[in-house]
Amino acid sequence: MSASPPTSGTAGGNQQAPPTTSQAANALVDREKIYQWIIDLSNPDTRENALLELSKKREVVPDLAPMLWHSFGTMAALLQEIIKIYPAINPPALTANQSNRVCNALALLQCVASHQDTRSAFLLAHIPLYLYPFLHTVSKTRPFEFLRLTSLGVIGALVKTDEQEVITFLLTTEIIPLCLRIMESGSELSKTVATFILQKILQDETGLYYICQTYDRFSHVAMILAKMVIQLAKEPSQRLLKHVVRCYLRLSDNTRACEALCQCLPDQLKDETFAMCLKDDKATKHGLAQLLKNIETMSSQTQKQQQPPGQQPQQKLQL
């Protein structure tokens, strides 16, 4: 969709001539179509086409999110699209058409989640929780994989903003164990998005503290990351490895976590296993070098410390 034409003024010099009446009319028609499609969302008979058309336009209509959020009945219609396929996910019976349709609705929710004017209200309404049943699914069929990936995209859009309220909200939900399960058994693309979400949670001080607060939380994260490294050694993915390394690097910023990583960091990150994979990725190569430096520094400090008499040795992470 092109930008709206100026309402006044004339072109001068080598500037382009102002839009013709026909061009201006086309721009207006496009805008009117957006309004009509939003209205059509409230009608079950016209909703499917409206979902498809609006999902195509979400990248080129900057204020689509506020229009969706503030228009009467629209968010309820989108939630209806999500809820009505719950019966198809357990037992798994989701068809390609059902998956495509609900993913168009999810794409519009991602639009709302991404926009600064609607994000807070989106969280306050706890709308991400409606997506969690989709992240619980384990079927490997394409409709389910597409559904999980699109749902992860909504959460990814939230964490991409680096806003404290997003992390605070997510930490009150089950998003971390859900991401860890997908990181362990999802497709490469789903694993990448799930690992990115975990990385963004870790980058926040509150998120890092939360994960390293208990032994069980940290050990679960460390165990899944280690499994991913072993799998990446067999099936390399530069994009996925980048996020795994960033997760490890951030964990090493926590003293207790760094002490545990001295014992459980996979050998594949210490040798030349990923040398070819990282050949053209200087940033990740630097991040890995910094991680190993942090581990080495912590290991040296630990060795120098004399164990006080009678004190029980600290529990070590075993994978």
Image (cartoon, helix red, strand yellow):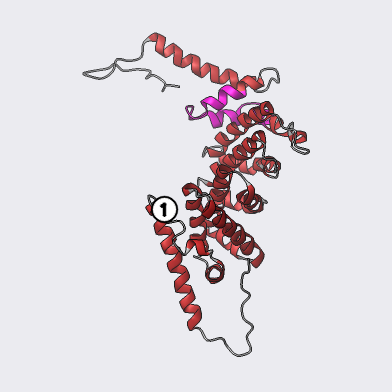
Residue beneath the point at 49% across and 75% down: 299
Identify the residue at horizontal 60%, vertical 42% (top origin).
152
Whether 174 is drawn above or below 58: the answer is below
Question: Where's residue 224, x and y in %?
Answer: 61, 57
Relative to 125, say whether 67 is above or below: above
The part of the image, by quadrant, that contains residue 110 is top right
Q: Secondary structure at mark 1?
A: loop
Q: Residues within 10 Å of mark 1 (few under 14, many from 20)?
A: few
Residue 173 shown in magenta: no
Q: Which residue is mark 1?
A: 276
Secondary structure predominantly adopted by residues drawn in magenta:
helix
Nearer-the-camera pick, 231 or 190:
231
> For residue 316, which quarter of the picture?
bottom right
Question: Is residue 63 located in the magenta-colored stretch of the structure?
Answer: yes
Residue at the farthest front position: 234
Residue under the point 24% across and 18% down: 12
What's the residue type where badge 1 is placed?
Answer: Met
Residue at 51% x, 79% y is: 302
Quarter containing the C terminus = bottom right
Question: Residue 311: image x %, image y %?
Answer: 62, 85
Q: Position of residue 201 (x, y in %)?
A: 55, 54
Q: Is residue 46 left or right of residue 276?
A: right
Query: Where does the magenta region start and end?
Result: 51-78
